[in-house]
Image (tube, rainbow, N blue to C red):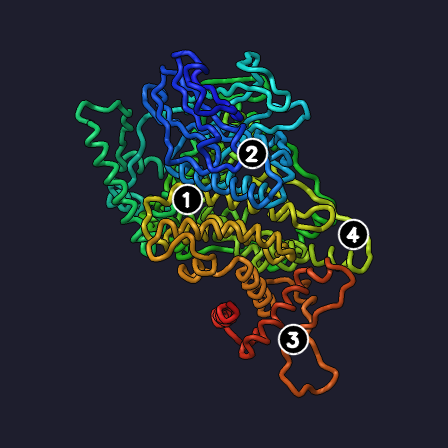
Amino acid sequence: MKVIAFTETWLNCNINNSELMDSRYVIYRRDRVITSTSKQDGGGVLLAVSKELQSRRMPDWESAGEDLWVVVDVDICGKSEKLALCVVYLPPTSSTQMKLKTLSDFLNSASRVLLKMNKVVICGNFNLSFIDWVFDKDTLQIIPSNYNNSIGTAFVDFMLTNSLNQICAVRNCDDRILDLVLTNISGGSVVQSSDLLSKLDPFHPSFEITFSLSPTCFLRPVLGDYRSFYKANYDRIWQHLGKIDWSERFSHCDDVDSMTLSFYNELYSVIDANVPLTTMKKSRHRPPWYTNALVGMLTEKEKIRKRRMEESIQKNPKTFWRYINKKRNGDNSVPSVMYSGSESVNSGQSIAQLLADHFSLACSDSQPVLPLSVESSFSNILSFGNMSSLQFTVEQVEKGLGSLKPSGGAGPDKVPPVFLIRCASVLALPLQLIYNRSISDGRFPVEWKRARIVPVHKKGDIHDVKNYCPISILSCVSKLFEQLIRPVLTCFVRPYISTYQHGFIRGRSTMTNLVEFVADVMTGVDRGHQIDAIDTDFSSAFDRVRDLGVVIDSKLKFDIHVDSVTCKAARMLGFVKRNAGDFRLPSTKILLFNCLVRSHLEYGSVVWSPSYVVHSQRLEGIQRAFTRYLAFTSPGISHRSSYDQRLDHFGLITLRDRRKLLDLLFLYKVINGFMDSTDILSRVNLCVPYNSPRKPISHIFECSRNRTNLGRHSPINRICVEYGELCSRAPDVDIFSDSLRKFKNQILKSIAGCN
């Protein structure tokens, strides 16, 4: 064994290290008598590290409790890296406040270590027996449950914020998992040990931890020649394409497919003649002149680049977010070994076939048979206004070509948008002829139905093909055709689209869908009606679909959802803290928090805004942790200052006030037609007094009387109450005549006045 860890050693200064182990190990220990724990006997932790490894104790990392930190140098593929090891014991106590204080002290110390170290292993007895650890088949991880108290919440938030996984599944005689192993290293496993170093404790069985520190190998890109369209001779291309009589060329074509084929033959011919080939070079090992001093200079250069990127966020946000997204998602490389069930393959061609076979399972070659009523409806739609007579002009096509993004990639036809943009004036005519012929014939070119499939990892093991979904990359000219015809087609079919269809409809969204559904269900339950709902899962066809982003339990509560979004936000907060160290401006870190963290905490809040303080505080804890981190890394304010002081210093408001702001903005958009939902609008009723009032009316909208808390806290009812409270604090606000910006500013002033 390379490292041996003990908790509850019961050692003291009278026992020498030489009495414990032989000379093969360096022993690091922290006995209870030198800690701040009130109980003097028992406790204590120990780490024994083999002398084959370079190791050293890190006393500055240790908290006031019983934890021991050691850094070990490990060799990974010929490169020396540092591994931080910690063994900890948190003694049981009857005082919840004392237990929370001891735990928080350790978690804060460990969080500071995790900001500096990429590879960390924390093991020991936390005495959190109330937490249940269950294996999740979707993520292939051991996840916590039943932790809804202050101690459990603090511990789980610490894990999520620092991207730690608990990998120990060894249960004791009571079928509980008490000793935990937290790590941010993938590929770790824990099994019960058969070799006992001491008498077996049935409540704390010994176990062995094994890590595979070798990095995952990925498929290398196929090197070859590619076209450099930025170095093309566009003068000759314009001259050649401009001389072609496309009308005469296409007159010999029988259908739109032959027109498309003729177009591409001419296009590929001119590309081959005028776009140079560039050879991709193989990467090589470091040359002799690539010294450590040069590496240090390049590191400093990278820091300066990040600072300049930070300073130019307003002018060039794309560069900043490209850097952040690369940190979040990586480069989407495919592992060199993948499997499906019991079949395992390790070559590029076989991996591609394995992925293709898996993706094909979600597709069907059979053509759907539509009922006669549906067919007749489609016939009425297509005949309405004689849609087949629709014709695009050359100017429309040229304008569409000019609107393409030059940085985009090529589709299966290998023609990038930069080429189409620079040749828009000479390509607009042939494309216009093909588009119009396609509409008149009612046939989409077969060539434009082809797609390049890219596998994208969704979750779980990156070696399992079941954890990938296909993304189709289409050709730019086919996407332009769709872009041109979409607004015209929408005008034809919009009158026939059901009011219950919310996806891909202007003015409607998942938000309007959720509010309508929840309002219907809560109102029905409040009135004693029976409500039945059918939930259909399309997760195999789409990247992720889960109740439109909001989880509702069988009791119409959002406890699970609050816990879910808090966990997601905590993970993302950890990402922000780990990757924002090189950014100096607080505004940059706030931007990252708002976009990556707060968005999880606010999506759909109009539907699920918590009515209980415990849930509100759970959500607020994420922003509390962020402002504490922000104050710790920024001058002018102490991280020990109060939450309100930190919010005021950085110009933020509480998440609770943010949810009220989003509620009122949602009401404004419904009232003023920014959202197309007659169902929601019909539920917002004006409050008409029976007699002429002597004072101005503060409650403009009527709040329904309810028998249950569900009806009382339903979205529409809650928002109408909040608007009445706003009117009483800001009498000048007018939801009917104020602009959206003015209305929002009125809300923010009201919130600032209350605080």
Give the left or right position of residue 699, taking residue 340 as reference. right
Crowding near the residue tagged with mark 2, few <14, some 14–19, many ≥20 C-alpha atoms within 10 Å: some
Q: Camera-side residue: 459 or 198?
A: 198
Crowding near the residue tagged with mark 1, few <14, some 14–19, many ≥20 C-alpha atoms within 10 Å: some
Mark 3 residue type: His
Pinpoint residue 139: horizontal percent, then vertical percent. 57, 32
Pinpoint residue 587: horizontal percent, then vertical percent. 37, 55
Where does label 4 land, which residue? 531
Q: Marks 1/3: CA distance?
A: 44 Å
Report the disc number at residue 577: 1
Mark 4 residue type: Ile
Mark 1 residue type: Lys
Q: Secondary structure at mark 4?
A: loop
The image shows residue 208, relative to residue 495, as above or below, that is above
Q: Secondary structure at mark 2?
A: loop
Q: Secondary structure at mark 1?
A: helix
Where does label 3 land, which residue? 699
Q: Residue furthest left?
A: 289
Q: Marks 2/3: CA distance?
A: 55 Å
Q: Nearer the viewer, mark 2 or mark 3?
A: 2
Where does label 2 land, which residue? 91
Q: Nearer the viewer, mark 2 or mark 4?
A: 2
The image shows residue 8, relative to residue 409, as above or below, that is above
Residue at 46% from the left image edge and 18% from the top image edge: 346
Residue at 31% from the left image edge and 37% from the top image edge: 271
Q: Earlier in the sequence, mark 1 or mark 3?
A: 1
